[in-house]
């Protein structure tokens, strides 16, 4: 109804000094004499001298996007799974890359991934424009654009001899606390300004979504968190006031008749079912939705001031490479009902006394819990909880479709579990490994928990 969501995102990106941010004009479109409403006219995301100006021979533009990635576009020859974080990626430039070029780009991007994964902040800063990375994260959280979870519509580029730069930003219609539950029948935005993507502690990911750790792992580094907080503090005073003021200039022009004409052509309504068959129809009006949007943004900004300032700071030597020492192993046998599948009657409880005997002193704020592949590498959390994963037949973490058993929890020591009835059979046994990590001043102490699933 407001037609302002992408425009506002562009204004914020511009305030954040994100490069190549789109400009906007509004037009009313007639197709063969038929009025079809208000459209936003803006630049394409493309490489040329007027847009993303990078070297024609050696410049690269990529997108992180499920729709263009190997899973949803399996026949495309310009996409790949990233080597370290297993993200769906697509080569947007060069336009028709050879298989060799795609492999080269994947290998080059893996250097950045490895630097992030190993908390090598000096290498990260040499490979990545960290300022643009921080701005991208802050923009997604501020506008609650949950498509970073997929991910979708995230662009980055690299010029010859340069760093990876995040942007240009694109597609913000699913932000602003959009209600996905009634996406086909309603038009509900701007409800709750306190929902968070990353949570109050990004490393714990204690927010509403579990996003790829490529976007999160740098929060393990004290210097990055300091940089992150400073960037937000630097723009906070003008973030809402200046950007909303600029956006309302577009709205004032649209109020001169365009909004009314569009509402006459495409009225947006919602049927609200009541008691005893009674129902009401809500007609969404631009003026009212604009007021809701402004109030939501103002409250959102104030709320994030508090949240971001409260992000915990890692220890001073958080980016110093430390030895990993396995200080204990816990083994748990679990009987998992094939019939109950995803809805088992019990849970997995880790013996805290046994854990503490192995781990020794620890601070729960510094304690993390991650899934582990059978070769000892850290796997992806493919389950819905803060901790856990789906595990495939070979013991490696896997997406739900290929998973056999799962561990899922928001608690460090009590876990839900279950099995995929389409992939498992009675009599199967699977082993899943979860790892506690406690970073001390000298080492990273580890306690591994091996869970042996017996399907009956």
Image: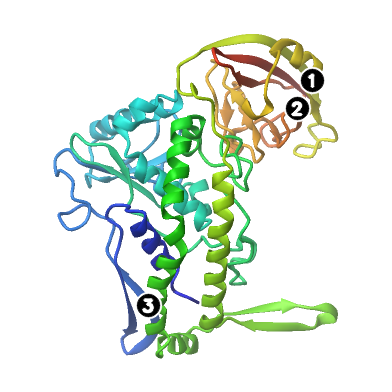
Q: Is residue 27 left or right of residue 72?
A: left
CA gap between label 3 and label 2 equals 52 Å
Q: Is residue 424 left or right of residue 39?
A: right
Residue under the image location 36 percent in, 88 percent down? 34
Q: Secondary structure at mark 2?
A: loop
When asked about the image quadrant of residue 126, the answer is top left
Q: Are marks 1 and 2 in contact (CB under 8 Å)?
A: yes
Relative depth, front residue between 256 and 184:
256
Q: Tag 2 or tag 3, which sits nearer the N-term?
A: 3
Q: Is residue 366 left or right of residue 78?
A: right
Residue 228 seen by the camera: yes
Residue under the image location 19 percent in, 34 percent down? 161
Relative depth, front residue between 299 and 51:
299
Q: Nearer the viewer, mark 3 or mark 2?
A: 3
Q: Tag 3 or tag 1, which sits nearer the N-term?
A: 3
Residue ID for mark 3: 250
CA gap between label 1 and label 2 equals 7 Å
Residue ID for mark 2: 413
Residue 71 seen by the camera: no
The x, y position of residue 140, in whole percent, is 48, 52
CA gap between label 1 and label 3 equals 58 Å
Residue ID for mark 1: 352
């Amino acid at each position: 109804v407001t037609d302002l969501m992408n425009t506002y995102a562009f204004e914020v990106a511009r305030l954040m000094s994100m490069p190549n941010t789109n400009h906007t004009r509004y037009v009313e479109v007639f197709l063969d004499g038929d009025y079809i409403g208000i459209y936003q006219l803006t630049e394409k995301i493309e490489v040329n001298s007027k847009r993303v100006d990078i070297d024609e021979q050696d410049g690269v533009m990529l997108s992180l996007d499920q729709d263009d990635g190997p899973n949803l576009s399996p026949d495309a020859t310009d996409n790949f799974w990233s080597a370290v974080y297993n993200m769906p990626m697509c080569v947007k430039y060069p336009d028709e890359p050879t298989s060799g070029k795609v492999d080269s780009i994947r290998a080059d991007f893996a250097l950045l991934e490895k630097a992030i994964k190993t908390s090598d902040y000096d290498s990260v800063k040499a490979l990545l424009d960290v300022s643009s990375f921080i701005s991208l994260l802050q923009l997604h959280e501020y506008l609650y654009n949950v498509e970073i979870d997929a991910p979708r519509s995230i662009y980055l580029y690299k010029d010859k001899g340069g760093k990876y730069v995040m942007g240009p930003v694109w597609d913000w219609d699913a932000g602003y606390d959009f209600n996905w539950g009634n996406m086909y029948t309603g038009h509900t935005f701007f409800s709750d300004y306190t929902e968070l993507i990353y949570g109050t502690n990004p490393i714990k990911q204690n927010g509403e979504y579990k996003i790829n750790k490529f976007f999160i792992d740098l929060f393990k580094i004290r210097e990055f968190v300091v940089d992150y907080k400073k960037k937000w503090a630097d723009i906070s005073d003008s973030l809402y006031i200046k950007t909303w003021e600029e956006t309302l200039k577009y709205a004032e022009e649209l109020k001169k008749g365009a909004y009314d004409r569009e509402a006459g052509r495409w009225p947006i309504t919602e049927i609200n079912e009541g008691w005893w068959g009674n129902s009401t129809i809500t007609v969404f009006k631009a003026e009212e939705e604009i007021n809701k949007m402004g109030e939501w943004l103002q409250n959102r900004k104030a709320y994030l001031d508090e949240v971001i300032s409260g992000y915990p700071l890692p220890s001073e030597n958080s980016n110093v490479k430390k030895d990993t020492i396995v200080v204990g192993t816990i083994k748990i046998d679990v009987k998992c009902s094939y019939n109950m599948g995803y809805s088992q009657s019990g849970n997995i409880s880790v013996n805290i006394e046994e854990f503490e005997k192995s781990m020794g002193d620890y601070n729960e704020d510094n304690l993390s819990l991650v899934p582990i592949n059978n070769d000892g590498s850290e796997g992806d959390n493919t389950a819905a909880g803060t901790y856990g994963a789906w595990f495939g037949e070979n013991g490696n973490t896997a997406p739900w479709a290929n998973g056999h058993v799962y561990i899922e929890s928001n608690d460090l020591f009590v876990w839900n579990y279950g099995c995929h009835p389409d992939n498992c059979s009675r009599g199967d046994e699977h082993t899943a490994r979860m790892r506690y990590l406690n970073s001390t001043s000298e080492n990273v102490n580890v306690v591994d928990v091996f869970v042996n699933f017996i399907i009956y």
